[in-house]
Amino acid sequence: MRKYTLTSLVAATMLATTPLPTWAETPKDQLVIGLSMTNLLTLDPAEAIGDESFDVLNNLYDRLVDMDAKTPSKIVPGLAETWSAAPDGTLTFTLRSDAKFQSGNPVTSADVVWSLKRVMKLNRGPASFMRELGYSAESLETTLSAPDEKTVVLKQATKINPEIVLYTLARAVGNIIDSKTVIEHQEGDDLGRAWLTNNSAGSGAFTLRRWSANDAVILDRNDAYWRGQPKMRRVVIRHMPESQSQRLQIENGDIDVARSLSGADLKAMATNKEINIQKVGSGGFYYLAVSTADKDFSKPEVRAILPYLIDYDGIGTAVIGDYGVKRQVPVPADYPGAIADPGYKLDIVKAKEMLTKAGYPDGFSTEMLVLSDSPYVDIATAIQGSLAQAGITVKIVQGNGTQVYGKMRDRKFSMIIGRSGGQMPNVLGAIQAYTSNFDNSPTSSQTASLAWRTSWDIPELTKLTSEARTEGDETKRTDLYKQIQEKFLSSTPPLFAIAAATQPSAVRADVEALTDQQSRSPQWYLVSKSQK
């Protein structure tokens, strides 16, 4: 009999009270996923930012509309059976009549209104996405309404392309919550925040049985799911920060999906006929960020040196591997309107000359925050080495999501290696986090904006980004996209794209309807296993 960690014991609850078996293979009606949960910080839809949280929330909750699993650029019905856009941009949604929350309560327009208002009232990270559309907690009182139980009307707070509003509502910020259930668990005026951190109140395909931070997440099937009963009775997510452990367990059949593998382990499994390697583009990027509030990086002449101290080719080949494709503009190269890379190359001699001219003939010392996961640590180590050659000494500090991104959101950092996530499958969705900062004050809490996190005050670039959101003509919008990218590069930014991120996963061959999904947040209700 094998020894079991706490994670294994939690996973074993899916076997009820039967004796613990050895893991020959996972049950046919259960999906077991191994990944690093260090960045899974909350399961409250109004607070969650990281992709790991999005994966879970996407299967606990539904939205008015969704991005198609195979073609994310296509908006498809969700809780809204139909919708229409008026000439002034007002969106009217008609809700399905058969959708119910996991409590049995029907999904009503009042729940939609309450959920979206809750996001803005709590004013956490996801609220930034609504603020970019011009909304605030106050404006939603007059722009968002429920004329009857199955109709939702969303007026524009400012001129905006309705397509962008739909894409925003299809993301995690648009998750609809069972307002009656959450209000029952409200503590004071927290709008259920404490309870929703580790409980669910959605209409999605699964319900949350248990979440134990950095241990396991267990989801049970929602038998009454309006899209049809999921084939998987349970989904178990196990915290497995070590790539080698994930590889061993997926090769042995102990897990079905491995999500945090090193490039070397992915390559080693490429010829294994029992395992398929899935790669999903995210629209996001691995990046190096520096704070413009830092005494050294506040100087544009110092920031201008950094592109010549990143070994893009070496990192792309030896470090990033299956996790991305070399790219120096934070827009995927295949997006309509994407511009060409500026062609930065590692040039230590040039960097030293620039450093001397900037007043640092002997260099300086600084600190870099990084998640203790692959490939972040490897990217950080590579950049640490090239910076050292130019005389810049970097201390790498590893941590979990709270320790790393928490400091970035508090704007208390010097350097960080991170990964952004595209919010829409277009240029704007990829780059707006880098180019929009409508209020640089510490209290504006634009935690989804990388420009705000780096204290980069960019009124002109923010204005251009806003214009792209409102432009309805495709040709003019594409021209604006190009202007935004060019101005970003010419403004000595504190953000440096390293590679367009992809999410590689190793998936057991008997798992069906997962590897053909191209959405960043997979829909597990579609998943089944072959019975061979």
Image (cartoon, rainbow, N blue to C red):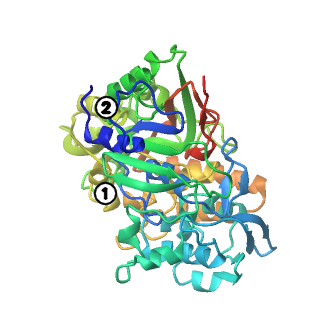
Left/right placement of residue 115 relative to residue 99 reads: left
Secondary element at image label 2: loop
Residue at the extreme top of the image, as rendered: 271
307 and 87: which is toward the camera: 87
Residue at the spot x=57%, y=26% of the render? 510
How far apart, in angstroms, are the residues tagged by discs 1 and 2? 23 Å
Q: Residue 129 placed where, x, y %? A: 53, 64
In the foreground, 375 or 532: 532
Q: Residues within 10 Å of mark 1 (few under 14, many from 20)?
A: some
Q: Which mark is residue 406?
A: 1
Marks 1 and 2 close (CB-CB < 8 Å) = no
Going by the numbered disc 2, the residue's amino acid type is: Glu
Instruction: Please indicate whether residue 346 sits to the left or right of residue 3 in the image.
Output: right
Please say if 41 is above or below 313.
below
Quarter of the figure with the N terminus? top left
Mark 2: few/some/many CA within 10 Å (<14, 14-19, 20+): some
| Left or right position of 169 against 22 | right
Q: Nearer the viewer, mark 1 or mark 2?
A: 2
Q: Residue furthest right?
A: 87
Image height of 532 relative to 168, above or below:
above
Q: Is residue 11 above or below residue 196?
A: above
Residue 257: percent from left, percent from top: 48, 33
Give the labeled residue for mark 2.
242
Q: Which residue occupies the foreground of this view, 384 or 5?
A: 5
Q: Which residue is located at x 39 percent, y 33 percent?
A: 308
Residue type, numbered disc 1: Gly
Q: Nearer the viewer, residue 417 or 301?
A: 417
Q: Position of residue 18 (x, y in %)?
A: 36, 39
On the image, which quarter does residue 111 sit in?
Answer: bottom right
Mark 1 and mark 2 lie on one chain; the one further toward the N terminus is 2
Q: Which quadrant, please, contains the C terminus?
A: top right
Q: Is residue 135 visible?
A: yes
